[in-house]
Structure formats: C-alpha cells, structure tokens
C-alpha cells in the first residue's frame, strides 16, 4: 500500500497555512527520495488542531497536529511518514477522544477523502440514499422524511417532511429546490465545512428532494464570503453531471434535475428564506409577507422546497439507512443529531455532532475545554447574533428545541459563542440592536425603526439617563418588535437584549432596591 498524506483544503486550514504545509511535505519527501502522495482532503472539524495532517499506510491512519510549515523538517527527522515519534503525533486518527466521543451521521465522511472524488464518496456510502429514493414513489420518499422526525436545521426547526409534502401536493408544471447556504450567524460554519468536505452529500440531498416533489431545477444560494466552497461546489456539480448523478437522466431513471450555484451579495437578511428568493430572482432582498408560503408560491411564483445545507444532507442518511435509524437518535420531538459549532472564547473550537439531548455545559467544558484565555466562562450565546445570552445556571438545560424554547432560547443553526468574565453584556445587548439596525431589510417599521431606537435607549440606560423610564421604554420597544416584526430579524433581536438585562443586570449598573 502506497503512503498517502492528507492535508486539508478547508478554509480554516488554509487560513492556518495548510497550503504551505502541503508544499513543505511534498518538497521534503522529494529531497529525501520518499515515495508518498499528498491528498487534499476536507477537514474533520477539529479546528483547534488545524492543519491536521494524517498519514495512511498499511498500519492505518495516524494524525499529527497542529502542523506548521516549520514543523515539517523535524517531523521527517523523527521518522515521518513512518513510525514518527514527535510532539505533534496524536496517534490513530479515529481514536482521538474529541472525535471518538461524537456520533456523526451528517459529518461521518468529513475529512476522510478528497471531497471532489466521486469514487471516494461512493466507497464511503455516498449516493446510497439517492439510489434508494429512485426506487421509491415520491410519496414514499416524503413519508420516510416525515417518519424520521427531521426538522429544518436552519433555525426555525420546521418539520422537513411537512414542507416537502406541501410542495408535492401543490400542482404545478415547474417546481424548484433551493438550498439556503447563506450561512451568516456568528459562530457558525457547519454549512461551509460540509460543502468543502463533502459536497456530493448536499447535491445528493437536493436531488432526493427533487425526486420526492417532482422538481427539475435547483439552486444553491451561497454566501459570497465562501470562495473556497464556491470553487469546490462548481467542480462537484460539473463532475456529478458527467457521472450521471445530475442532469437530464439521473442514473438511467428518466428523472432530471439540474443544479445551479448562485452567489449572494453579503446581505444577512438573505438568510431569511423569502428574502433569499427575492435575491435569487434578481431583486433586492426583502422579506415577503406570508402566506403564501414558499412551498406553495416560492421562486418565480412556483412551489419551492427551501432548506438549508444540513437539512438536505441529513435527508441522505434517512433515505440510505431508513427513517427509524435516524429517528432513534435524539430525544422528544428533536430527532437525529445536532451539529454544534464551538466558537468565541473557546480553547478547542470546531464542529461537534451529537444526538439531541446533551447539555451545553458538556459541550463547552468537555469538548470545548473552557475558554481560550483560561478565565472563567460567564455567558454563552446559542443560535447566532439573535440568540439569548445564557448564564451558568442555564448551561445544564438539554440541547433540544423544546427545552431551549422553555428558557426563551433557540438552537438556531447550532452556533455556540463563549464569553469569559471580561465580557460587557450591556455592550453585547447594544450590539444586538445595532446589528439589526444595520442588517434590516427595512420593509417593516418595528424592525427598521425599533432597532435604531433600541440602540439609543440602551445608550441612555448605560449613561444613567432617566434609568427607570428608559428601562420601561426598552421593554415596551422589545414587545413591539417581537409582536410586530415581519420576520425573525426584528422578532428575535429583543431576545439577546432581554436575556442580558435579566441575567446580567449589573453590567447595566442596575441594582436591586
């Protein structure tokens, strides 16, 4: 067996000199006349170890990290790529505790191979779900997704099967599949990681949806800040078409489905599904009134399935291994696995996939290892910039949709941002209002005007100007935004503000009397 050395081409790894590491390994091996092949794989999501270099030979797969270009000569001097005894040697890759304690379904293939190799994708179980779907009726596919309990991973957690059923049942000569890859929440990178490490899984999931509802055209709406994902997706779409997994006759089934990649223009609001549809149509991204729902009248007025990257990806597991297999992970009405992204002031940042039901404390302490600064954790924000700030008393709540709703929180897209005890929560509350003011599409008054007034009122509270009156005004303003905003942009902005006021009042110089 020839020796293969894997060096990730993921955006995070590239930012940490992965290209230079790959070049150094190739050059050093050539200088020493060592025969090896460098494979640019996707990342496993252990970003705290990137660049994570892996060796595959007859003894298995061993990991080293984080490796810098300057480390490479020493690694070779210490036996690399053979029996290398070095401070960066981590042992068998699959035995790394951080990875071994996870239960990966959606990210089971991430980091194992060249993300653009269809042969590798198939050898690791890829396209099994689509092959099964092609042998089923559309209703049987939708029924499996409903039975699995899969809910949208983009934030709203709407049952995926119900959405697909609505599109299937709505008569039309043209239906669309749209993937929302406009991943803009703070602390989130799971969509990007999957597109860069396992792009065919997204293509497969979208194609399963197309077969299920009778759609022939699909679009991936990708945020402009992901240039590496853009390159990988364009190549993956082209290769999938040539291999017959996309196009006019998918694997001889008579089914057709074409996918086109579209790039966003940097607007956070286009992560909202109806605003995204406006942008896809070449318009300014503005939130639409609902009803009608996009499932009935979506892109170009036609029935449209719109899900995010992780939702489509999860559907491949459901169709490959069965609804019951997927449903057996999780708890209550939160089925399957939750993909969380550990970010902020965290020692071991990266992607963790576990069944619903584990606790926030377990994730940030056991997987995250506490803060990067070594200072005590004080607050954790879950669910993006519009998520609540959770104090230590709430870190033992189970990570599932209903449990988090019970504490006025949300899981959103699974972003977890950690703050140590130096954080000023009054300023974080101000940031939430300011973020809304900057990113609002401007269509509805509560969001457009309320967020601007919110910044002003918080500034007056911090400055101790008419404190009691402004606190009352801020609460009333939050009520108006929650009840009157057209979409979640304005409707959720008060959540981080109220949680900061409730749990960290001292940062606003508020004292009990």
Image: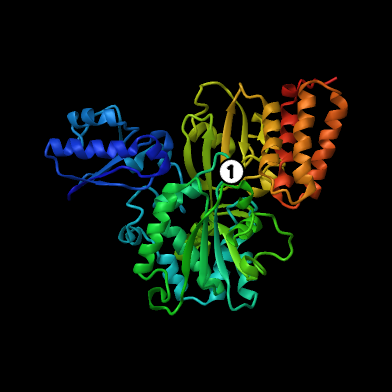
Q: Is residue 144 visible?
A: yes
> Measuring 12% from the left and 35% from the top, which residue is drawn there?
32
Query: Quick check: 153 left or right of 408?
Result: left
Q: Which residue is mark 1?
A: 185
Judging from the image, what secondary structure is the residue with disc 1 in?
Answer: loop
> Vertically, is 304 above or below 67?
below
> Measuring 35% from the left and 35% from the top, which residue is drawn there?
17
The x, y position of residue 418, in whole percent, is: 57, 32
Query: Quick check: 113 left or right of 290?
Result: left
Q: Quadrant of residue 378?
A: top right
> Measuring 21% from the left and 33% from the top, which residue is drawn there?
84
Q: Quadrant of residue 203?
A: bottom left
Relative to the observer, which residue lies in front, 192 or 361?
192
Relative to the observer, which residue lies in front, 195 or 409?
195
> Mark 1, residues whose alpha carbon is within 10 Å: few (<14), some, or many (≥20)?
some
Looking at the rendered image, the quarter that the C terminus falls into is top right
The x, y position of residue 111, in whole percent, is: 37, 47
Q: How is the image coloured?
A: rainbow
The x, y position of residue 228, in whole percent, is: 41, 48
The x, y position of residue 23, in whole percent, is: 25, 39
> Vertically, is 396 above or below 323?
above
Q: Is residue 198 visible?
A: no
> Vertically, is 480 above or below 475?
below
């Amino acid at each position: 067996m020839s020796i293969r050395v894997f060096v990730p081409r993921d955006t995070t790894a590239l930012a940490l000199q992965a290209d230079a590491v790959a070049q150094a390994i190739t050059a050093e091996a050539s200088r020493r006349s060592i025969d090896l092949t460098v494979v640019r794989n996707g990342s496993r999501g252990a970003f705290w170890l990137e660049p994570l270099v892996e060796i595959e030979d007859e003894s298995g797969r061993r990991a080293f990290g984080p490796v810098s270009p300057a480390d490479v000569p020493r690694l070779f001097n210490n036996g690399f790529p053979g029996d290398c005894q070095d401070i960066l040697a981590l042992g068998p890759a699959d035995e790394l505790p951080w990875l071994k304690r996870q239960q990966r379904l959606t990210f089971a293939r991430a980091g194992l191979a060249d993300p653009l190799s269809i042969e590798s994708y198939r050898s690791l179980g890829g396209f099994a779900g689509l092959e099964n779907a092609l042998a089923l009726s559309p209703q049987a596919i939708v029924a499996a997704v409903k039975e699995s309990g899969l809910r949208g991973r983009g934030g709203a957690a709407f049952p995926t099967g119900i959405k697909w059923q609505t599109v299937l049942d709505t008569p039309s000569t043209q239906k669309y599949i749209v993937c929302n890859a406009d991943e803009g929440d703070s602390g989130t990178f799971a969509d990007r990681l999957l597109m860069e490490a396992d792009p065919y899984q997204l293509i497969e999931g979208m194609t399963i949806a197309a077969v299920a509802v009778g759609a022939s055209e699909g679009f991936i709406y990708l945020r402009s800040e992901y240039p590496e994902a853009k390159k990988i997706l364009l190549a993956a779409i082209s290769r999938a078409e040539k291999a017959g997994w996309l196009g006019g006759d998918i694997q001889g089934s008579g089914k057709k489905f074409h996918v086109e990649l579209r790039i966003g223009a940097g607007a956070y609001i286009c992560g909202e599904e109806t605003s995204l549809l406006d942008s896809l149509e070449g318009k300014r991204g503005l939130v639409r009134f609902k009803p009608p729902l996009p499932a009935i009248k979506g892109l170009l007025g036609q029935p449209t399935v719109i899900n995010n990257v992780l939702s489509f990806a999860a559907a491949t597991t459901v169709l490959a291994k069965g609804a019951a297999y997927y449903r057996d992970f999780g708890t209550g009405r939160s089925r399957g696995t939750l993909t969380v992204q550990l970010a902020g002031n965290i020692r071991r940042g990266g992607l963790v996939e576990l069944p619903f039901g584990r606790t926030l404390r377990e994730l940030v302490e056991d997987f995250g290892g506490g803060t990067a600064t070594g200072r005590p954790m004080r607050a954790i924000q879950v669910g993006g910039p519009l998520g609540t700030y959770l104090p230590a008393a709430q870190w033992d709540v189970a990570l599932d949709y209903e449990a988090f709703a019970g504490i006025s929180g949300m899981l959103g897209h699974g972003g977890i941002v950690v703050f140590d005890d130096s954080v000023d929560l009054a300023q974080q509350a101000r940031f939430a209002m300011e973020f809304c003011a900057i990113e609002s599409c401007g269509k509805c008054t509560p969001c457009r005007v309320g967020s601007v007034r919110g910044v002003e009122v918080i500034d007056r509270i911090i400055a101790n100007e008419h404190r009691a009156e402004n606190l009352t005004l801020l609460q009333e303003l939050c009520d108006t935004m929650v009840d009157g905003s057209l979409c979640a942009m304005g409707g959720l902005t008060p959540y981080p503000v109220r949680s900061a006021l409730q749990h960290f009042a001292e940062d606003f110089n508020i004292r009990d009397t």
